[in-house]
Structure formats: structure tokens, C-alpha cells
Amino acid sequence: MKLLNKAAFLAANDLAHEDVPVPQLGGSVRIRVMTGAARDEFQEYMRSFGEGPRPTTAIHAALLVQTCVEESGEPMFTMDDIELVRGKSVAAIETMAAAAMRINGLGVQAVDEAAKNSGSDQSDDSGSDSHSHSENP
């Protein structure tokens, strides 16, 4: 494997994605591997619940906000859209969230651990073995 310089490092497209069929919505949604910044924003949102209960749909919606992208690769949502995402059917949310967790190497337990481990910015499963079933944008 070649040694990358800064330009090659920054030019590398390592954000694999997958177009996930969501029959409940009548189409597919593109789910992408989170960037480092997106992962941090997701974990910060998780920490905002403190030790209190974490509503499952809110967690799934926050994950979707960080992983759903337009065909262009631009984020589909912002954190301000969490409640709008939560307004969709639970079946659609769960279909997309399951794909987002798989693509990002997160299990249900890993998502929960991300909220608890405020000092840890990386899970044991980095998701680096994640592969796209479609071409990267």
C-alpha cells in the first residue's frame, strides 16, 4: 500500500455509502459513513440526555441526520430536523437506522455506549471494513 501525502489523504474518498430501500417512503435513501465531525455531533447529542432515558426514535433520528445524504453527497438534514425525521413512521425510521448502524459499524449497544462514554470518541468497531454497494459520489 502506498504512503499518502497530505493532498492524497485529503483527496481520498473514504465515505462509502449505500442506497437503502425504504418501502414505507416509496423509495430509497442514501446512507453514508459518518465523517469525524458528524460522529462528534452525534455523540454530543447523545450526551445531552445525561443519565436520563434516551428516546429510541430521537437517537435513531439523530443518527439519520448524520448519515442521510442527497445524491450529490450533501447532508440531507441538519440537527434542527430531528423532530421532522421523528415524524416519519417508526418502521421507516428503524429501516434506515438499522442500515446506518450497520454501515457505520455501530450496533444498538455501540450507539448506547457512545452516549455513556463522553470521553471516548471512537468505538471498538470503527466501521472501516464497511463497503458500499453503490459508487461513492
Image (cartoon, rainbow, N blue to C red):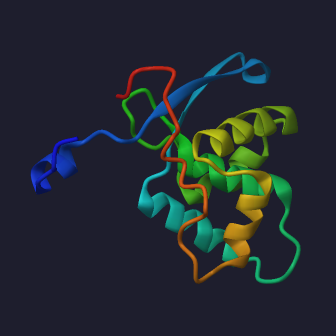
Is residue 54 visible in the rendered structure shown here? yes
Residue sitting at the far front = 1
Q: Residue at x 39, y 21 (%)?
A: 135
Give x and y (percent) for residue 81: 62, 52
Q: Is residue 20 left or right of residue 108?
A: left
Q: Looking at the picture, tell me which residue is in the foreground, 16 or 22.
A: 16
The C terminus is located in which quarter? top left
Work out whether 21 lies above or below 6. Answer: above
Q: Residue at x 77, y 48 (%)?
A: 86
Give x and y (percent) for residue 89: 84, 35
Q: Residue at x 43, y 54 (%)?
A: 35
Q: Looking at the picture, tell me which residue is in the foreground, 42 or 111.
A: 111
Q: Quadrant of residue 2?
A: top left
Work out whether 52 lies above or below 126. Answer: below
Q: Is residue 81 left or right of residue 86?
A: left
Q: How many marks?
A: 0
Q: Quadrant of residue 6?
A: bottom left
The N terminus is located in which quarter? top left
Is residue 48 visible in the rendered structure shown here? no
Give x and y (percent) for residue 88: 78, 38
Give x and y (percent) for residue 123: 60, 64
